C-alpha cells in the first residue's frame, strides 16, 4: 500500500463538500496531538537518554572498571529502548542527512558494519575517535549497532581493564555522534516554523502535504509500514517456521540481549502515538470498535514482547518464550489488518486501494 494510493482512497471519504472543513480541522487536531503528545516528548527523552549514555562512556574511558562498564552497558540498553519507541517515526527530520541510517544501520545482511567496526578497532583509526569526524564516515560504523559491538562484542570485557583503550575512545565518539543526531532531530521537531508546522497545516504551497488527506495518510503509514517492519523485517529475520530454522544471531541487539525489549519498545511507541494523537477520533461512531480493537491488540502485543525478553538464544530455546514471539507475529498481523483494512476503510479506503492489484 503506497502513500499515493492511500491518499487517493482517503480522498474518497474525506473530500465531500459537507465534511471537508471538518476533515481539515480534525486532521490538524490529530496531527497536532501526535506531535505535541508523542513525537516531541519522545525525542526529548531520547536526548536525555543519549546524554546519560555519553556521560557513562566518558566515565568508563576515564576510569575503566567493571562497575563503569556495566553502567555504560545499561545506559546503552536504555538508549536502544528509547530509540525503539520513537524510531517508528520514519519521516521528517530523521530522514535528512542520512540520520535514520546513521542512528541504526540495520538490517546489515552483509555484515558491513561489523567489518568496518572491527577494522577500526584493529587498526586504531584515530579519525574514528572524534564524533564530528565520525559523522562523515560510513553510516554503518557510527550508530547503535556499532556501539553495541564496542560494548558487548568480542573483546568488550577488556574495556574494564586497568588502562584506557582505543576501543573505549571509539565508543565514546559513537555515543557522542548518536547524541548529536538526537539533538538535531529534537530541535527540528520543536521548531514551530519547521516540519511540524508543514505537517499540521497542509496546503497548495506546502512542499510535503497538499491537503488533509495526505497529512492523515502520513500518520496512517506509521502503522502500516511500522508493523510490517517489526514483524516481517525484525522478527522474521531470526524466527524460523520451526526451532531448527531459527537464526538468533540475525536478531537486532542480540549481543546486548535487547531483542525482545526493542520489539516491545516499537509496539509501545505505536500504542502511545495512537493514544496521544486520538487517531480513533476520526472514525465514524459506528466504527468506534476499530479503535477499541486496536488498543486491545496493542496490549496483547506488548504482553507478548515482554514475555520474550532476555538473551535471544535463551528465548528461542524456551518453548514458552518462543511461543510468545510466534504470538507476537500473529497479533501484529491482526494490527496490520485493523489499520490497513478496517481503519483505512472506515476513513474512505474502499476496493481498489491496494498497490498490488495495479491500481
Image (spheres, rainbow, N blue to C red):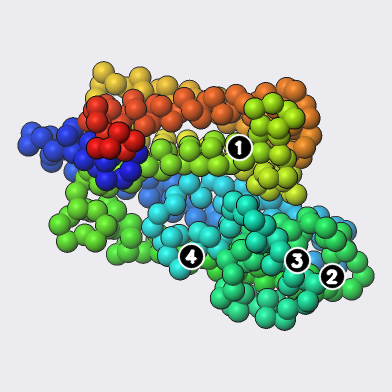
Give how far apart the Cα atoms at labels 4 and 1 are: 24 Å
Q: Of marks 2 and 3, which one's residue comes earlier in the chain?
A: 2
Q: Quadrant of the C terminus?
A: top left
Q: Residue at x 48, y 38 (%)?
A: 228
Pointer 4 with pointer 2, Cβ within 8 A: no
Residue 67, picture quadrant: bottom right
Give the vertical position of 224 relative to 44 (above or below): above
Locate residue 325 relative to residue 217 in the image: left or right. right
Q: Residue at x 42, y 65 (%)?
A: 96
Label 1 sits on residue: 235
Label 3 sits on residue: 118
Label 2 sits on residue: 63
Q: Of marks 2 and 1, which one's residue comes earlier in the chain?
A: 2
Q: Of marks 4 and 2, which one's residue comes earlier in the chain?
A: 2
The kind of secondary structure element at disc 3 is helix
Give how far apart the Cα atoms at labels 2 and 1 are: 38 Å
Q: Of marks 1 and 3, which one's residue comes earlier in the chain?
A: 3
Q: Residue at x 78, y 30 (%)?
A: 317
Residue 116 image offset from top left, x and y in percent: 69, 67
Give how far apart the Cα atoms at labels 4 and 3 are: 22 Å
Give how far apart the Cα atoms at labels 4 and 2 are: 34 Å
Label 4 sits on residue: 98
Name the residue furthest right.
Answer: 162
Give how far apart the Cα atoms at labels 2 and 3 are: 23 Å
Locate residue 335 relative to residue 309 in the image: left or right. left
Name the residue furthest bottom.
Answer: 126
Amino acid at each position: 500500500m503506497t502513500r499515493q494510493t492511500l491518499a487517493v482512497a482517503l480522498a474518497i471519504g474525506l473530500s465531500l463538500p459537507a465534511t471537508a472543513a471538518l476533515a481539515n480541522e480534525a486532521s490538524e487536531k490529530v496531527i497536532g496531538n501526535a506531535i505535541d503528545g508523542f513525537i516531541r516528548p519522545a525525542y526529548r527523552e531520547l536526548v536525555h537518554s543519549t546524554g546519560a549514555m555519553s556521560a557513562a562512556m566518558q566515565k568508563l574511558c576515564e576510569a575503566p572498571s567493571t562497575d563503569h562498564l556495566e553502567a555504560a552497558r545499561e545506559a546503552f540498553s536504555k538508549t536502544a529502548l528509547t530509540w525503539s519507541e520513537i524510531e517508528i517515526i520514519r519521516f521528517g527530520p530523521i530522514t535528512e542527512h542520512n540520520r535514520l541510517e546513521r542512528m541504526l544501520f540495520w538490517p546489515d545482511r552483509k555484515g558491513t558494519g561489523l567489518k568496518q567496526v572491527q577494522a577500526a578497532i584493529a587498526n586504531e583509526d584515530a579519525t574514528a575517535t572524534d564524533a564530528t569526524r565520525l559523522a562523515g564516515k560510513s553510516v554503518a560504523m557510527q550508530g547503535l549497532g556499532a556501539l553495541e559491538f564496542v560494548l558487548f562484542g568480542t573483546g568488550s570485557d577488556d574495556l574494564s581493564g586497568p588502562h584506557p583503550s582505543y576501543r573505549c575512545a571509539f565508543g565514546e565518539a559513537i555515543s557522542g555522534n548518536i547524541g548529536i543526531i538526537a539533538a538535531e532531530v529534537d530541535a527540528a521537531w520543536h521548531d514551530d516554523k519547521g516540519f511540524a508546522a508543514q505537517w499540521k497545516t497542509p496546503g497548495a504551497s506546502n512542499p510535503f502535504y497538499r491537503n488533509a488527506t495526505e497529512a492523515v495518510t502520513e500518520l496512517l503509514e506509521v502503522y502500516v509500514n511500522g508493523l510490517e517492519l517489526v514483524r516481517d523485517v525484525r522478527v522474521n529475520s531470526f524466527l524460523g517456521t520451526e526451532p531448527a530454522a531459527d537464526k538468533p544471531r540475525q536478531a537486532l541487539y542480540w549481543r546486548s540481549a535487547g531483542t525482545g525489549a526493542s520489539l516491545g519498545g516499537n509496539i509501545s511507541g505505536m500504542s502511545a502515538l495512537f493514544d496521544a494523537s486520538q487517531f480513533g477520533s476520526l472514525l465514524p461512531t459506528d466504527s468506534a470498535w476499530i479503535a477499541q480493537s486496536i488498543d486491545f491488540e496493542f496490549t496483547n502485543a506488548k504482553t507478548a514482547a515482554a514475555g520474550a525478553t532476555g538473551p535471544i538464544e535463551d528465548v528461542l530455546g524456551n518453548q514458552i518464550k518462543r511461543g510468545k514471539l510466534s504470538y507476537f507475529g500473529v497479533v501484529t498481523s491482526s494490527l496490520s489488518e485493523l489499520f490497513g483494512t478496517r481503519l483505512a476503510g472506515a476513513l474512505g479506503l474502499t476496493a481498489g486501494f491496494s498497490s498490488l492489484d495495479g491500481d
